[in-house]
Image (tube, rainbow, N blue to C red):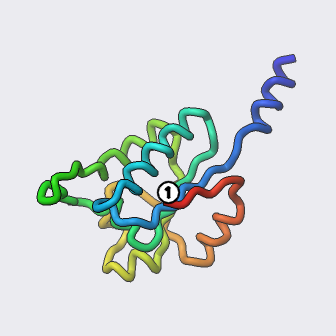
Amino acid sequence: MNDEFDEDAASTIKRFMFVNRKAPHGTIYALEALEVVLISAAFDQDVSLAFLDDGVLQLRKGQDAKAIEMKNFAPTYRALEGYDIEKLYVERESLEARGMTADDLVVPVEVVDRARMSALMSEQDVIMSF
């Protein structure tokens, strides 16, 4: 009977990808996305994050948001591993367009080109874009 329960539980696990396209400050999108990611992981879903366009700036080291009176939440991304969220993808073209490399980011990521990012997205059950 436990085997049946485990099988049923496994069939309810969905692959969620959260796509981050917005800069980290100036709107609530980036912080709200991070909160939704943590909630999804708490429900034992298969969670991955993708950073494209200005979303790559969310992971940039050395952010200082004091001048705009906002909290720098970039270090929170380091806590993702504790929630078993280890699939972080950054679009190479977005990094390069902003003069950045993976070394500029606060957490380890997999840098992928636009075609690979598209393929990863097509493998998901649910995509939420912020």
Q: Secondary structure at mark 1?
A: strand
Q: Residue furthest top?
A: 1
* Closer-to-camera residue (100/43): 43
**Rendering coords of residue 94 (x, y %):** 43, 76
Can residue 116 be seen? yes
Q: Is residue 45 left or right of residue 23?
A: right
Q: Nearest the camera: 2 or 29?
A: 29
At a point 62% along the width and 78% down the height, the residue shown is 115
- Which image quadrant for residue 61? bottom left
Q: Nearer the viewer, residue 69 or 80?
A: 69
- Residue that mark 1 sits on: 88
Q: Residue 31's spot in the image, x, y percent?
A: 37, 50
Question: Image quarter for residue 40?
Answer: top right
In the shown orientation, is residue 124 left or right of residue 107?
right
Q: Position of residue 52 (x, y in %)?
A: 47, 70
Kind of residue sitting beneath label 1:
Leu
